[in-house]
Image: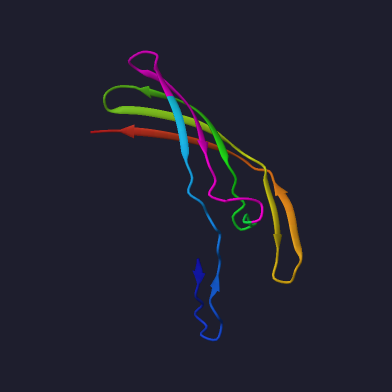
């Protein structure tokens, strides 16, 4: 990634994240309770494009992720639906081990998690 500045006397800055190709695999299940209610659940593995602790930065502290999700849907009639979902994302601990241009070592670890709540009201006409 190259950053060009508006100031012509300031040189461009280049960031090389050395990303790799990744995979994402997921599995979901839907259970229809009756004509009005549906329950959804799912699991996903989402691989990080960051190669290792030496290429990971505090700017992009990404790591592999595991998703668990659950949701419910309710259909009032053919025009009105409501969906609610919750997902929790577990991030693998992210180690950072870098040496900057001045020879100083930067070491650390990041521990993350995320919660996502969603709701949808759909009215068709």
For image coordinates 62% across by 56% down, the residue present is 55
Looking at the image, residue 31 sits to the left or right of residue 58; the answer is: left
Residue sitting at x 44%, y 26%: 28
Does 57 sit left or right of 119 as displayed? right
Of 124 and 99, nearer the camera is: 99
The part of the image, by quadrant, that contains residue 34 is top left
Residue at the spot 48% in from the left edge and 49% down from the top edge: 21
Q: Residue furthest bottom?
A: 9
* The C terminus sits in image quarter: top left
- Residue 36, given in percent of the width and then of the height, sits at 35, 17
Choose top left, top right, bottom left or bottom right for residue 29: top left
Q: Start and end of the magenta stretch?
A: 29-54
**How many numbered discs sit on the rendered protein?**
0
Task: Residue 44: give x, y in percent of width and height.
Answer: 50, 33
- Picture layout, residue 15 above or below residue 87: below
Where is residue 80 drawn, in percent x and y?
A: 31, 28
Residue 33 on the magenta span = yes
The residue positioned farthest toward the right in the image shown: 104
User: Residue 115's spot in the image, x, y percent?
Assistant: 57, 37
Nearest the eye: 19 or 6: 19
Q: Is residue 81 shown left or right of residue 100?
A: left
Name which residue lies at 62% across and 52% down: 61
- 24 left or right of 105 in image: left
Coloring scheme used:
rainbow
Q: Look at the image and say whether residue 40 sits in the magenta stretch.
A: yes
The residue most toward the left is 125
């Amino acid at each position: 990634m190259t950053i060009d500045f508006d100031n012509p006397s300031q040189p461009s800055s280049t960031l090389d994240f050395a990303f790799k190709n990744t995979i994402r695999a997921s599995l979901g299940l839907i259970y229809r309770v009756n004509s009005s209610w549906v329950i959804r659940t799912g699991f996903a593995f989402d691989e990080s494009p960051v190669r290792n602790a030496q290429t990971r930065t505090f700017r992009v502290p990404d790591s592999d992720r595991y998703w668990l999700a659950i949701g419910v849907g309710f259909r009032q009639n053919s025009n009105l639906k409501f969906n609610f979902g919750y997902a929790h994302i577990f991030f693998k601990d992210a180690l950072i081990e870098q040496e900057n241009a001045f020879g100083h070592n930067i070491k650390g670890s990041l521990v993350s998690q995320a919660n996502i709540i969603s709701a949808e009201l759909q009215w068709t006409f």
